[in-house]
Image (cartoon, rainbow, N blue to C red):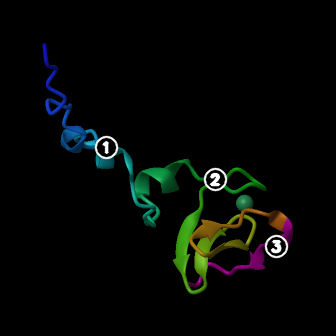
Amino acid sequence: MEIDFSAKEDVNKIQPPVGASHFIRPEKKMPISPALLEILACPKCKGPLEQTQSPEGFGCRACGLLYKTEDDIPNFLIDEALPWTGED
Ligand SMILES: [Zn+2]
């Protein structure tokens, strides 16, 4: 009896799982949200911070310090904070 070898499994039908790309999220820069701003506090006095535009960062009126944002990353090192008058 002859065996039919032509009936092979069609490997070309195998495809990547549908929806796999759903799990690949592009890194996207997000602006600081008001909700995040609410939980941010001055590392020195734990007081509220105000977002500033020039230079971009977060200012603390109580301390008179401005924590600069560089490359979208707030720098909350007290030693590197700038003097700030709050007259932004
Ligand atoms: Zn402060």
Secondary element type, mark 2 = loop
Q: On the rendered structure, is 73 left or right of 31?
A: right
Name the quadrant containing residue 3.
top left
| Residue plotted at (62% across, 67% down) | 73
Mark 1 or mark 2: name the one nearer the start of the chain: 1
Residue 30 placed where, x, y %? 43, 64
| Residue plotted at (53% across, 70% down) | 51
Secondary element type, mark 1 = helix
| Residue plotted at (14% across, 29% down) | 7
Name the quadrant containing residue 63.
bottom right
Between 30 and 80, the residue placed more toward the observer is: 30
Q: In which quarter of the image is the C terminus?
A: bottom right
Q: Which mark is residue 41?
A: 2
Instruction: Count how many numbered circles sit on residues in the image.
Output: 3
Q: Is mark 1 within 8 Å of ligand 1?
A: no
Q: Nearer the viewer, mark 1 or mark 2?
A: 1
Residue 8, placed above or below residue 50: above
Residue 69, placed above or below residue 33: below
Residue 77 placed where, x, y %? 79, 63
Residue 48 placed where, x, y %? 60, 56
Between 7 and 50, the residue placed more toward the observer is: 7
Q: Give the range drawn in magenta.
A: 79-88
Residue type highlighted by circle 2: Ala
